[in-house]
Image (cartoon, grey):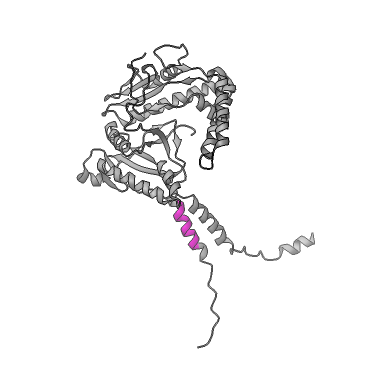
């Protein structure tokens, strides 16, 4: 048995192997993320616990013929956005449209102070939650400083309902229009107070605008209480 | 001038390819890390509706995908041409949803070694509904009702983004 030094393994084909793997991963890769519309379903057993005043519920219904009923009146898809904006903002302060609750500086400042106090008392388990609470309160205060009287708390709930026979396509189009209405409101306010277009806004400013007009869409808001 | 002349007479040395595997491996690792393998092929017809104002799901590992649509041509003899629900890679009835959700929750939990964190993650699960645009809302309603029973309340409708930005 003669001892031979083992021949060196050629690494020339290494590149080929790596290329093969590379191409495999290139093909199976999906880099772009899926676009979605997020929704939180109502809990199944609290149908009677959450009471919303009648005036604050904005009903939108799609029927089997894909016709849209907005607060009981027939509208076109193209009209929906404007109408919804008008009702949510309720600038004329109509009593049958959603209520806007005025905020005041002292109250928001009080919430910040309270959150600070709680953070000092927090233990390691609750620290994270308390910190984010404080951040939220501070952001709210800052938003008030910038947007002033435009920052009201709207009590509205947009309730999107549909009959079983309606087309899914119409339903999604409708959901989209509702979200577009929110965006248009934010854009309008950004123009008015910050004098900026949407693309010029910083992420913090967008966050603030979302505080001013929080998306409040429900799959099925239960209407209780007769107070008008 | 003569100095340059002298140089140009030399033969061009071949470029060493020894570092080529390294470069390719680097690319390979990048794609391996960035990859999310394509989910199983849908066995129902799926034309996703368009929408302008949409968001994206940050963490795909928290996503449970439910496809709804008419079965593809080869399966229509077996399942009919009404919109059906596809879970994983089989066509199921509504009764299959609780088990599907439970399995997905376990899967998310097992991703993390810390059971506490796993529990929290599984609560963040999002059920992505990929529904064919020709379907009726009734099918969707039934699914949502099942999801509510399972307390899986975060849902998302997958759409085709036609807006300019997220």
Residue A104 spot, x, y in % from top left: 55, 19
Residue B158 spot, x, y in % from top left: 38, 37
Residue B65 spot, x, y in % from top left: 36, 43
Task: Name the magenta segment's main secondary structure.
Answer: helix
| Residue at 47%, 13% in the rendered image | A91
Residue B42 visible in the picture: no
Does residue A56 sit above or below B144 in this rendering?
A: above
Residue A48 visible in the picture: yes
**In-front residue for pair B8/A197:** A197
Q: Which residues are magenta?
A: A16-26
Q: Work out which quarter of the rendered image holds the N terminus of chain B and state it.
A: bottom right
| Residue at 20%, 45% in the rendered image | B77
Per the image, is A157 magenta? no
Image-based side of B112 in relation to B48, left or right = right
Per the image, is A25 magenta? yes
Image-based side of A29 in relation to A4, left or right = left
Image-based side of A73 in relation to A93, left or right = left
**In-front residue for pair A17/A72:** A72
Q: Quadrant of residue A177?
A: top left
Q: How many marks?
A: 0
Q: Quadrant of residue A86?
A: top left
**In-front residue for pair A60/A172:** A60
| Residue at 48%, 62% in the rendered image | A17
């Amino acid at each position: 048995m003669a001892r031979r030094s083992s021949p060196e393994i050629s690494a020339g084909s290494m590149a080929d192997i790596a290329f093969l793997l590379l191409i495999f991963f290139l093909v199976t890769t999906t880099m772009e993320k899926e676009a979605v519309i997020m929704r939180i379903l109502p809990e199944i057993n609290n149908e009677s616990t959450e009471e919303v005043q009648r005036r604050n519920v904005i009903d939108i219904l799609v029927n089997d013929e894909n016709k849209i009923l907005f607060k009981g009146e027939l509208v076109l898809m193209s009209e929906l956005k404007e109408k919804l904006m008008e009702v949510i903002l309720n600038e004329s302060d109509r009593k049958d449209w959603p209520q806007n609750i005025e905020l005041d500086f002292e109250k928001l400042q009080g919430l910040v102070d309270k959150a600070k106090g709680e953070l000092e008392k927090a233990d390691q388990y609750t620290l994270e939650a308390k910190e984010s609470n404080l951040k939220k309160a501070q952001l709210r205060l800052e938003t008030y400083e910038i947007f002033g009287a435009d920052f009201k708390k709207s009590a509205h709930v947009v309730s999107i309902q549909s009959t079983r026979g309606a087309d899914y396509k119409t339903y999604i189009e409708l959901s989209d229009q509702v979200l577009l209405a929110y965006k248009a409101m934010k854009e309008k306010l950004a123009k008015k107070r910050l004098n900026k277009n949407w693309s010029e806004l910083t992420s913090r400013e967008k966050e603030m605008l979302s505080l001013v007009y929080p998306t409040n869409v429900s799959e099925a808001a239960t209407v209780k209480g007769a107070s008008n | 001038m003569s100095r340059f002349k002298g140089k140009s007479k030399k033969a061009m040395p071949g470029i060493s390819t020894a570092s080529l595997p390294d470069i390719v491996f680097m690319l390979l690792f990048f794609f391996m890390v960035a990859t999310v393998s394509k989910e199983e092929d849908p066995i129902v017809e799926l034309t996703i509706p368009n929408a302008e104002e949409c968001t994206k799901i940050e963490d795909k590992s928290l996503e449970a995908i439910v496809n709804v649509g008419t079965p593809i041509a080869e399966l229509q003899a077996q399942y009919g041409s009404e919109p059906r629900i596809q879970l994983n890679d089989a066509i199921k009835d509504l009764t299959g949803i609780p088990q599907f959700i439970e399995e997905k929750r376990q899967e998310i939990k097992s991703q993390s070694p810390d059971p506490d964190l796993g529990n929290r993650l599984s609560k963040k699960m999002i059920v992505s509904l990929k529904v064919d645009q020709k379907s009726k809302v009734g099918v969707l309603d039934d699914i949502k009702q099942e999801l509510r029973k399972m307390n899986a309340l975060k849902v998302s409708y997958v759409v085709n983004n036609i807006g300019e930005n997220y």
